[in-house]
């Protein structure tokens, strides 16, 4: 039997999506560990989704600020969000910004 030959566009699409698939797999494995740690709710209603999303968002904001040397507008561009939204979320997440001097 002959195997179906992939078109050039299918090959290009696979190359572009491969890094995302790898990242998704890594994230899923790490989230499994994280959810195991956080899921012991002690009889109360689980807030797992809310807690994990807060941790992820806070981490992304800290990374963006480090990569932009504390420049909020550059950090917002890095994340693909509006600067005012970035600043508001920063406050909600309890993140302070000390620019590198």
Image (cartoon, rainbow, N blue to C red):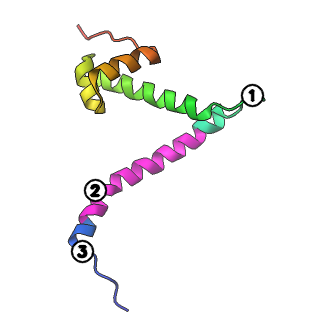
In the image, residue 8 lies in the stretch drawn in magenta: no
Relative image position of residue 38 (x, y in whole percent): 64, 31
Of mark 3 and mark 2, the one earlier in the sequence is 3
Q: Which corner quadrant of the image does residue 66 belong to?
A: top left
Confirm whether residue 69 shows in the render. Answer: no
- Magenta-tinted stretch: 12-33
In the image, residue 19 lies in the stretch drawn in magenta: yes
Relative image position of residue 96 (x, y in whole percent): 38, 11
Label 3 SS: loop
Residue at x 37% of width, y 22% of height: 62
Relative image position of residue 42 (x, y in whole percent): 76, 28
The overriding secondary structure of the stretch rendered in magenta is helix
Mark 3 — residue?
7
Q: How many marks?
A: 3
Residue at x 67% of width, y 34% of height: 39
Q: Residues within 10 Å of mark 1 (few under 14, many from 20)?
A: few
Label 2 SS: helix
Please identify the residue farthest to the top as the structure is shown.
101
- Marks 1 and 2, Cα distance to the nearest angstrom? 43 Å
* Mark identifier at residue 16: 2
Q: Residues within 10 Å of mark 3 (few under 14, many from 20)?
A: few
Q: Nearer the viewer, mark 3 or mark 1?
A: 1
Relative image position of residue 25 (x, y in whole percent): 47, 51
Residue at x 23% of width, y 21% of height: 73
Of mark 1 and mark 2, the one earlier in the sequence is 2
Confirm whether residue 36 shows in the render. Answer: yes
- Marks 3 and 1, Cα distance to the nearest angstrom? 53 Å
Q: Residues within 10 Å of mark 2 (few under 14, many from 20)?
A: few
Mark 1 — residue?
44
């Amino acid at each position: 039997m002959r195997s179906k030959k992939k078109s050039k566009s299918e090959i290009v699409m696979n190359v572009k999506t491969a890094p995302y698939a790898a990242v998704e797999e890594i994230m899923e494995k790490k989230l499994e560990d994280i959810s195991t740690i956080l899921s012991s709710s002690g009889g109360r209603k689980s807030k797992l989704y809310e807690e994990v999303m807060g941790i992820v968002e806070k981490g992304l904001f800290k990374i963006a600020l480090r990569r932009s040397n504390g420049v909020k507008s550059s950090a917002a561009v890095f994340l693909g969000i509006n600067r005012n939204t970035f600043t508001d979320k920063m406050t909600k997440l309890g993140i302070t910004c000390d620019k590198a001097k």
